[in-house]
Amino acid sequence: MNITGFGSQLIWEDYSFKTIDLADAFYSLNGIPTTDNTVCGYFDDGSADLWTLNEVRYANRDPLLRATLFIPGMAWGEKGWYYGGAAASYSTLYVMKYFNPALNWSTSWDSGQDFYVIRYAEVLLSLAEAYIEKNEGLDRAVFMINSVRERVGMPSVEEVEGADLSQAALRDIVRHERQVELAFEGLRLFDLYRWGLLKDAVDRINNEATTFNFWYEYRNYRGEQEYFWPIPQTEIDSNSQLEQNSLWK
């Protein structure tokens, strides 16, 4: 695949790249993040042993985890195939969303599941975010977030984070909920743009590669250029009155 520019790389990542950071965003069934930081074993030279994996760290997690990622210790449908396949993933994880384990291994990606354009869960979370950003109707926002959580049996906001939360606290909650609920649906990049958190996401991916000694492609953050696209050169060439965005000169 020909990838040009960091934005394209991150869009591609949203579809096919899977990280420990994403896996750990799926909290335990009690609504609390995991504290188990052991992911895999290591060889004498310090390189990651992608076949010696800590399956226990993924136990008792948000059910969305297994619907989204193919994780260590997880069987592929009824076929008895476990994590790994023909080659280990650089992150020890694979994408599960859109795949159908009931199909032949060579066509499991062609599941008949349409790409998600918009879902009711996204409608609820988008409206909840709007209420939170207006700092009005926060109780409605909490109700909508709880509706999404309740669908998969996860505890409510009141049970985990508490009641009468501030705008800032609810903002963090709805952003986290979007990350896990809408993973691999083509929305993450634009959420990060809207929140101004692109650099944070890039840093987390690069830090993960260093922490676990994974063979990730290095992600390059280009500052404000990431938020302001250049005027296409063909448009400038055809109109002498156009001047390139100063960030791209």
Image (cartoon, grey):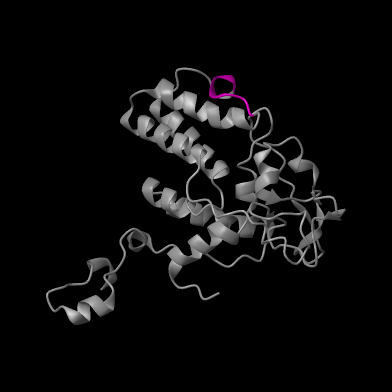
Please state the total of marks drawn on the protein image: 0
- On the rendered image, what quadrant is the C terminus found in? bottom left
Q: Is residue 150 magenta?
A: no
Coordinates of residue 189 in the picture (x, y in percent)? 45, 54
The magenta stretch is: 154-159
Coordinates of residue 164 in the picture (x, y in percent)? 45, 18
x 76%, y 54%: residue: 101
x 42%, y 23%: residue: 140
Task: Report the side of 201 relative to 137 (left or right).
Answer: right
Question: Given the current orientation, which residue lies at the most extreme top position?
Answer: 163
Task: Report the side of 94 relative to 157 (left or right).
Answer: right
Residue 57 lies in quadrant = top right
Identify which residue, 28 or 43, lies in the foreground: 28
- On the rendered image, what quadrant is the N terminus found in? bottom right
x 57%, y 54%: residue: 114
Question: Given the current orientation, which residue lies at the most extreme left position?
Answer: 241
Coordinates of residue 230 in the picture (x, y in percent)? 29, 69
Identify which residue, 133 or 90, lies in the foreground: 133
Give the answer, above or below, for where 200 lies relative to 147.
below
Give the answer, above or below, for where 160 lies relative to 204.
above
